[in-house]
Image: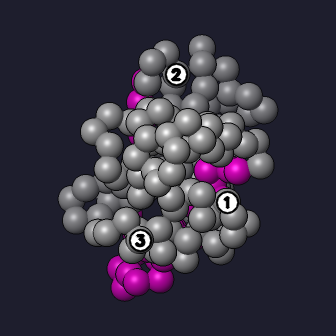
Amino acid sequence: MHRKDAIAWGVSVCSVSLRSSQAKTLAILVAAAMRVQRISLANIGRAMDGAAKHQIKRCWRFCANQRVETADAMRGIVAKLLKRRKKKLLIAVDWVEIKGFQTLVASAVLKGRSTPMAWASTTNHVYDGHRSRNAFEESLLGVLGA
């Protein structure tokens, strides 16, 4: 997929739930991330068009933006997946440990592969705003509309 095609697809999918400027920035970041060998903010920024210093800062600003929620960005992708399917979409939910964080990942199972759709992380088995681990898991499923 060419860079411009990836950006156009990303904008069309994410503009449903994000501001157009946020959707455009996210699409540009994804297109740049597809070209790097090792994911980091600096590498993604360097892979973007323009002066590396400014693009790295743009990448950092977007990732630090409190108004951009992962669930909002994924809403358009989930809708696109569900629109094409005739069968029900199978969602696998699993706990994984990533650098000391317990992360609950909900992934769509497509052609024998799992594609992460939503995730939530916690530390020390403390489920912020939830009474129990089960309540934490149900809140993640609520994000997906399941």
Q: Position of residue 50 (x, y in %)?
A: 51, 51
Q: Which residue is mark 2?
A: 101
Q: Residue furthest front?
A: 51
Q: Which residue is mark 1?
A: 22
Circle number at residue 4? 3
* 119 left or right of 93 in image: right
Q: Earlier in the sequence, mark 2 or mark 1?
A: 1
Q: Amino acid at mark 2?
A: Phe
Judged by depth in the image, the label closer to the viewer, 3 or 1, is 3
Residue at (25% x, 55% y) in the render: 113
Q: Earlier in the sequence, mark 3 or mark 1?
A: 3
Residue 95 falls within the magenta-colored stretch:
yes
109 relative to 58, above or below = below
Judged by depth in the image, the label closer to the viewer, 2 or 1, is 1
* 46 left or right of 121 in image: left
Q: Are marks 3 and 1 in contact (CB under 8 Å)?
A: no
Q: Which residues are magenta?
A: 68-97
Residue 66 falls within the magenta-colored stretch:
no
Residue at (51% x, 61% y) in the render: 27
Q: Position of residue 28 (x, y in %)?
A: 50, 58
Q: Which structural element holds mark 1?
A: helix
Image quadrant holding the C terminus, namely: bottom right
Q: Position of residue 67 (x, y in %)?
A: 77, 49
Q: CA distance from mark 3 to mark 1?
A: 17 Å
Q: Are marks 2 and 1 in contact (CB under 8 Å)?
A: no
Q: CA distance from mark 2 to mark 1?
A: 27 Å
